[in-house]
């Protein structure tokens, strides 16, 4: 599942990178865009889920398509610049990471953005995740000392 298609991301990137409308992107862009689009979707879902939002809320986020398209475009251009720096000159370096707009950046004076559904702030409906949650949680485990442990009867210190 994805909010935008690879074709949407390719059209977005092409509009920003190719100077003439008759030109097309090189063939290597297709696989890079596909991987980048999947990575952008995973970033969005993971970010909002870690804040306690459930899948249906994330799927209704007002800016999901635009943000995924921008992030996938940024990932794609960054990767192409790494692999083929001579093909587009410094043009690909001009892409700005849109994650700063979402996560916030104190140096730029940007506050983290809330999840907005239908023009209104949404409260998380799920539990906020953390280190102690998930399949590796040990919060319900009971740790006991063995019968012959030398620490039995000693005072614990903090």
Image (spheres, grey):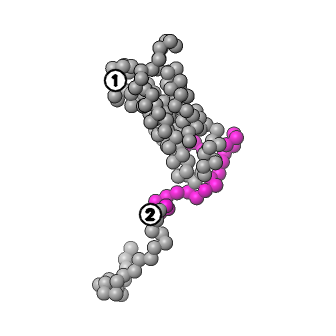
Task: Point out the stretch of residues depicted in magenta.
Answer: 110-134
Magenta stretch encompasses residue 120? yes
Relative image position of residue 43 (x, y in whole percent): 49, 43
Q: Mark 1 — residue?
A: 85
| Residue name at image x 49 percent, y 72 percent | 140
Q: Is residue 147 above or below residue 132?
A: below
Residue 94 in the image: above or below residue 37: above
What's the mark number on residue 46? Answer: none
Tell me if mark 1 has few (under 14), some (14-19) or many (20+) residues whose alpha carbon lies within 10 angstroms of its own.
some
Residue 77 visible in the displayed image: yes
Please tell me in which quadrant of the rendered image residue 77 appears.
top left
Residue 103 seen in the figure: no
Give the image location of residue 155, x and y in percent: 37, 83
Query: Which quadrant does the C terminus fall into?
Result: bottom left
Q: Position of residue 116 (x, y in %)?
A: 64, 42
Residues 107 and 140: in front is 140
Q: Which residue is mark 2?
A: 136
Q: Is residue 31 left or right of residue 101?
A: left
Residue 4 picture quarter: top right
SS at mark 1?
loop
SS at mark 2?
Answer: loop
Q: Is residue 40 above or below residue 134?
A: above
């Amino acid at each position: 599942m994805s909010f935008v298609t690879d074709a949407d991301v390719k059209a977005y990137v092409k509009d920003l990178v190719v100077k003439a409308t008759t030109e097309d992107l090189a063939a290597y862009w297709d696989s890079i865009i596909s991987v980048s689009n999947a990575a952008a979707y995973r970033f969005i879902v993971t970010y909002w889920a870690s804040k306690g939002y459930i899948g249906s809320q994330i799927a209704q986020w007002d800016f999901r398509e635009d943000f995924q398209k921008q992030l996938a475009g940024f990932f794609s251009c960054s990767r192409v610049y790494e692999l083929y720096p001579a093909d587009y000159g410094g043009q690909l370096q001009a892409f700005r990471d849109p994650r700063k707009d979402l996560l916030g950046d104190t140096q730029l004076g940007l506050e983290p953005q809330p999840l907005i559904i239908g023009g209104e702030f949404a409260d998380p409906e799920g539990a906020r995740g953390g280190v102690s949650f998930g399949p590796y949680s040990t919060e319900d485990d009971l740790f006991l000392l063995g019968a012959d442990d030398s620490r039995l009867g000693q005072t614990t210190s903090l």
